[in-house]
Each structure stands twice: as structure tokens, then as C-alpha cells.
Amino acid sequence: MRTWRISLALVAACGGSAKQASAPVTAAPTCKSAAEHMIDELASTKDPRPSDDIINKQIALIRTRCEQDAWSPEAVQCLAAMQGTADADRCATMLTEAQQGALVRDQEEAAGHKAEPSGEEEGAMGRAAAPPPPPAPAAAAATPPPVPMPATRGPKPKGAGRAEDPDQGGE
């Protein structure tokens, strides 16, 4: 009888029935883990691989911008899962213009220069790139350029270019 009471107490303490194992809950990626993954992916494509000092500075820069500029959870998740520069470009589209601008500004400052963006710079995150120019307004694109006026050689003689009046001496 005593063992029955202990069993009943154990069942009551454990909630009455056997619990099923739940799937492990994975935490959403952080700015730190996303920055580490992103820079590691981009650095792995370089030959020779950048030094640990350069890699750590880039990780710190990306992490700081992510945290201070409050990058969206979707952008952080994208960076944490990226597999190459094409993914980095796609992830960059998830940032606002202000977030992209702050990232590029800090990267240029870290590189020790304030370069004007050129068309030759690559666009993946982690590398300086200019945002694409805004599209031209539709009205401006539809308006043709003005047509230049033909040159004149001087005044026309009187009556030149006038149609003859049939009431003046004609048949």
C-alpha cells in the first residue's frame, strides 16, 4: 500500500501523464550571430583570407549598425542564413535607405577614406556600394527633347510664301 501512495504522489507531481518531448526551440539569430556568419561567409570567398583583426573589425561594425539601427528580424535572419554574395545583396534590400547609408558610411570610415561610389564597386553587404539612383519621373521620360529651329538666311522678300489670291487678277 505504501508503494501505491508513492506512485500516486509521483504521478500527481509530474502532471498526471507522461509528457511528450517537444521540439527544441531555437532562438532567433542575434545581430552578433548574424554579423559573425555574414562576415565569415564573405571572408571565405577571399584568397588570401583576410586577417582575424580585419574580420573582427568587420563583425563589430556590422553588429553595431544592426543593433543601433534596429535592423528588422527578417534582415537579421536573412544574414544569419546567407550563403554568398547573392544572398547578401538580397538581404541588403531588407534594410532601409538610412540603414544602408549608415553601414556604407561606417565602412568607408573604417577603411580610412570617404570615397565617392563608382559603378565598379560591388553591391553585397559588407562592401561599400551606392544605392541605385531613383527612377526618372514618368512625365520627364515621356517628354521628347526640344527640336531646334531651322536657321534663317535673312528676311524673306515681300509676297514670298503667300498663296496667290484667286480674286486678284486670276481667272
Image (cartoon, helix red, strand yellow):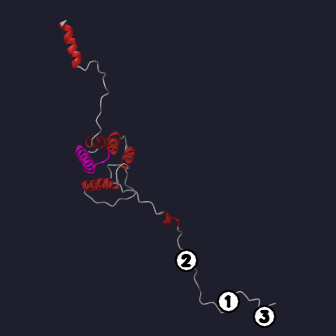
Mark 2 or 3, closer to the camera: 3
Q: Is residue 143 above or below residue 45?
A: below
Q: Which residues are magenta?
A: 52-72
Quarter containing the C terminus: bottom right
Q: Amino acid at mark 2?
A: Pro
| Residues packed near mark 1 inside 10 Å, few (<14), some (14 to 19) or many (20 plus) | few
Q: Give yes or no for residue 54 being in the magenta stretch.
A: yes
Give the residue drawn at x 35%, y 43%: 74
Q: Amino acid at mark 1?
A: Ala
Q: Which residue is mark 3?
A: 169
| Residues packed near mark 3 inside 10 Å, few (<14), some (14 to 19) or many (20 plus) | few
Question: In terms of secondary structure, where does tag 3 sit?
Answer: loop
Q: Give coordinates of residue 137: x percent, y percent.
A: 46, 63
In the rendered structure, which disc, 2 or 3, sits on the residue that comes first in sequence? 2
Front-most of residues 107 and 137: 137
The CA distance from mark 3 to mark 1 is 18 Å
Count of numbered circles in the view: 3
Give the residue drawn at x 76%, y 93%: 168
Q: Quadrant of residue 47?
A: top left
Q: Which mark is residue 34?
A: none
